[in-house]
Every structure is written in structure tokens, then in C-alpha cells.
Image: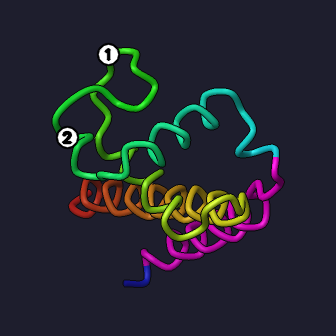
């Protein structure tokens, strides 16, 4: 456990940096792709339907998990960009923690 504390400290510092640098301005939702994506999600109103076909931009990509993330943000925050930015920051922090965990698993026996 002694060897792990620098990693946990790094995760905490990176997490704090990500959290305080998150985007929360209204311009986050005004990007052309994001605006179309949210309009299509609100139009369809059926989150599970994204597992059966194209994603909202209609460019022949199959991305149900990222679309579900937008569905969740839309349900929780509507048109409040701060919530979308918070979700993105939390996902980035989770990725930092997952990377640390993977590196610990790979190097524990060294």
C-alpha cells in the first residue's frame, strides 16, 4: 500500500484539475453537431432505440453508449450546459482512475 499513495495523490490532483477546468458555458450546447444530436435525441424519445441502428447524426456510426450518455444528460440537465460539462469531467476522472488501476495491475509484480 505504501507504493500506491503517490498514484492516489496523482489521481486526486488530476481529478481536481479536470473538475475545475470543465466547460460550463452555454456555447457547449451550441456546437453544430451537439445541437443536432440533442434535437434528434429529443425527437426520438426512446433511449434503447439507439442500440438498433445509426446514432443521431445519421452518419452510419453505431455509438449507443455515447448516445445514452447524451440521453442521460438531456434527462437530467435539459438545456443547462453546466451539467453536461460536469458529466464530461466525471467521465474523464473515471478514465484517469481506470488508467491508474490498469497500470497498477500491470506493474504490481515488478
Disc 1 from disc 2: Cα separation = 13 Å
Residue at x 37%, y 52% (from the top left corner): 45
Q: Which residue is mark 1?
A: 60
Q: In the displayed structure, does residue 66 sit left or right of residue 96? A: left
Q: Which residues are magenta?
A: 3-26
Q: Secondary structure at mark 1?
A: loop
Say above or below: 99 vs 97: above
Q: Quadrant of residue 27?
A: top right
Where is the N terminus found, in terms of image quarters?
Answer: bottom left
Q: Residue 2's x, y, as percent? A: 43, 83
Q: Quadrant of residue 35?
A: top right
Judging depth in this view, the residue of 17 and 88 nearest the camera is 88
Q: Residue 22's x, y, as percent? A: 74, 58
Q: In the displayed structure, does residue 77 sit left or right of residue 52? A: right
Q: Which residue is mark 2?
A: 51
Q: Residue 37's x, y, as percent? A: 52, 36
Where is the C terminus found, in terms of image quarters?
Answer: bottom left
Check whether the beta carbons of the residues at disc 1 and disc 2 lie within 8 A of each other. Answer: no
Say above or below: 21 vs 65: below
Q: Residue furthest top?
A: 59
Q: Quadrant of residue 59?
A: top left
Mark 2: few/some/many CA within 10 Å (<14, 14-19, 20+): some
Residue at x 74%, y 45% (from the top left corner): 28
Residue at x 31%, y 46% (from the top left corner): 65
Say above or below: 4 vs 14: below
Q: Residue furthest bottom?
A: 1
Amino acid at each position: 500500500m505504501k507504493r500506491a499513495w503517490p498514484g492516489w495523490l496523482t489521481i486526486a490532483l488530476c481529478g481536481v484539475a479536470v473538475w475545475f477546468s470543465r466547460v460550463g458555458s452555454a456555447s457547449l450546447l451550441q456546437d453544430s453537431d451537439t445541437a443536432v444530436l440533442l434535437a434528434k435525441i429529443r425527437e426520438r424519445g426512446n433511449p434503447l432505440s439507439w442500440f438498433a441502428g445509426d446514432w443521431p447524426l445519421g452518419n452510419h456510426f453505431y455509438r449507443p453508449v455515447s448516445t445514452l450518455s447524451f440521453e442521460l444528460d438531456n434527462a437530467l440537465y435539459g438545456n443547462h450546459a453546466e451539467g453536461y460539462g460536469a458529466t464530461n469531467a466525471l467521465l474523464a476522472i473515471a478514465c484517469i482512475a481506470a488508467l491508474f488501476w490498469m497500470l497498477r495491475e500491470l506493474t504490481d509484480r515488478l
